[in-house]
Amino acid sequence: MKLTKKGYMTRLIDKTIEENLEVFGAISIEGPKWCGKTWTALNHSNSVTYLNNTANNFREKHLAEMDVNLVLDKDKPELIDEWQEVPAIWDAVRFKCDQDNEKGKYILTGSSVPVSDKIHHSGAGRICKMKMYTMSLYESGDSTGDVSLKDLFEDKVKNKLVNKVELKRLAELIVRGGWPETINISVEGAMKIARSYIQAVLDKDIIEIDGVKRDKQKMEMLLRSLARNESTISANNVLIKDIDDNITEEDVTISRNTVTDYLNVLNRLHLIENQNSFMYKIRSRLNVGKNPKRHFVDPSLGCAILNITPEKLINDLETMGLYFEALCERDLRIYAESIGAKLYHYRENDIGVEVDSIVEIADGEYGAIEIKLGGNKEEEAVASLKRFYELAEVKPKFMCVICGLYDAVVKRPDGIYVLPITALKP
C-alpha cells in the first residue's frame, strides 16, 4: 500500500518515476528543498526512512551511520529521504541492487549533492538519477493545457480561443512561484515563504552542505547579482562587475575564486539552473555564444532576494519581462524533461540573432521558441525566429511565440504558432 499523503497533487514526474522503477533497482530524485520530492516519492513507496527526522535524537540517522543495512530492510519500494545525510547509503544501495535483478527496490531523495569523495561508485546502471523542480503552471492548475508541447512537434495544434490572464495575475504567479506550499495560500504568504527560504540558505545551508564556513554577506551579494541578472547570459566576470558596481562598503570585495565556489554551492543546493547554449545544426562559421543563460530554479527566489512584489513588477515591465521569461523557461524545462527532451537557448554574437528557448527531443528534432510578455511584441519575436530559421542548416520542427497577455492559440499564415503560457502542457 503506497504512502501517498492526503491532498497530494499529481506531478508530471510521477509517470517517469513509475517507468524508471520498472527498469532500475533504485532511483534518486534530486531537487531543491520544498519542491515536493518527499511527497512525490511517498506516492510510489511502501515504506520510508527519514534521515533528517529529529525523533529520538535522530535515531534513524544514527542507525544508518552505525550500519546502513539497519535502515535498508523495509518493504519495497523503500524511500530513504535526504539520503545525503549519510552518504554511505548510496554505495550500500548500489551494492544491494547488484545482488539480484529485482527492480524498483529503493527511492532516494536529496536536497543537496554530497561531497563526491564520500561516494565510491557512480551507481550507473543501478541507480537512475532524476531531477525534480517546483510546480509548473500546468501542475498547479494555472495552465489549462489546451496545447501540448508534443502536439507542437507533431503539427496537431488547432486554432482556438482561450482565457486571457490579466497582467496582475501573471505578476502574482511569478512572485508566488511553484512551491507546493504556496499554491493555495495568499500571494503575501507565498512571498514570506520565499523570503524565509533565502534566509535559511544564508543562515544554514551554505555551511551545512560541506562544513565550510562561508561569508553570508558575500553570498547575499552574489544572490542579489544573480537576481538582477535573471534570464540573462552573464559570465562570472559579469557577475563580479555587477557586484563591484553595487557594493556600498569600500572594504568589501569579492574574488573570482569566491564567486566560482559560491556558484558551485548554489548548484549543489539545486537553487540555480543553467540553460545551456544550443551549439549545433547551425552554420559553423558563425560566432555562436557558448555561455549559459542563468536562472534561479524558481522565479520567486529572485523576487524574494530583491523584495519584488507584484506591484513592483507591473510598474517595471522590463524587469517583469525578464521574470516572465524565467517563469516560462521553468515550465518549458519541466515539460521538456517529462517527454524526454532538453531545453537550450541560442545566441549568435556577430549579427545579434537570439532565440529564447530551444526544445530538442530525443531524435534530434527541435523547436524554436521566443518569449514575450505582451502580444504587442509578436512581430518582433516572429522576425527573430525567421532570422534564426535562415541560419539553421537543419530547420526547426516548429517555431512558436509564447506570450503572457494573449487570448488565443493561433498558427499564423507563415506557420509560426502564437499562444499564452497559461495554455501549455507537455
Image (cartoon, rainbow, N blue to C red):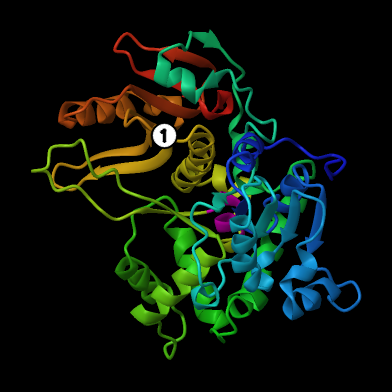
Quarter holding the N terminus?
Answer: top right
Q: Residue at x 75, y 63 (%)?
A: 72
Which quadrant does the C terminus fall into? top right
In this view, 110 is above or below 77: below
**From this viewpoint, which residue is outermost toward the right?**
56
**Place of residue 46 in the rendered image (x, y in percent of width and height, measured from the top left):** 82, 47
Residue 413 position, x and y percent, is 32, 8
Relative horizontal placement of residue 208, taking residue 192 as reference (left or right): left
Helix, strand or loop at mark 1: strand
Residue receiving disc 1? 371
> Quick one: 78 or 326, which is closer to the camera?
78
Residue nearest the observer in this picture, 112 or 367: 112
Whether residue 375 is situated above or below residue 32 in the rendered picture: above
Q: Is residue 64 left or right of residue 416?
A: right
The image shows residue 188, relative to residue 22, as above or below, that is below
Asked where in the image residue 372 lies, by quadrant, the reply is top left
User: Residue at 74% of width from left, 69% of height from top?
Assistant: 69
Q: Disc 1 residue type?
A: Ile
Residue 52 visible from this viewpoint: no
> What segment is highlighted magenta in the picture?
297-304
Does the magenta segment cover residue 301? yes
Is residue 258 in the magenta section?
A: no
Q: Residue furthest bottom?
A: 251
Residue 383 visible in image: yes
Q: Is residue 9 above or below residue 199?
A: above
**Along the line of sight, the residue nearer the viewer: 224 or 393:** 393
Looking at the rendering, which quadrant does residue 6 occupy? top right
- Majority SS type along the magenta span: helix
Residue at the far front in the pictured view? 100
> Mark 1 Cα within 10 Å, few/some/many (few <14, many 20+)?
many
Please tell me how many numbered marks the rendered image carries.
Answer: 1
Front residue of 397/304: it is 397
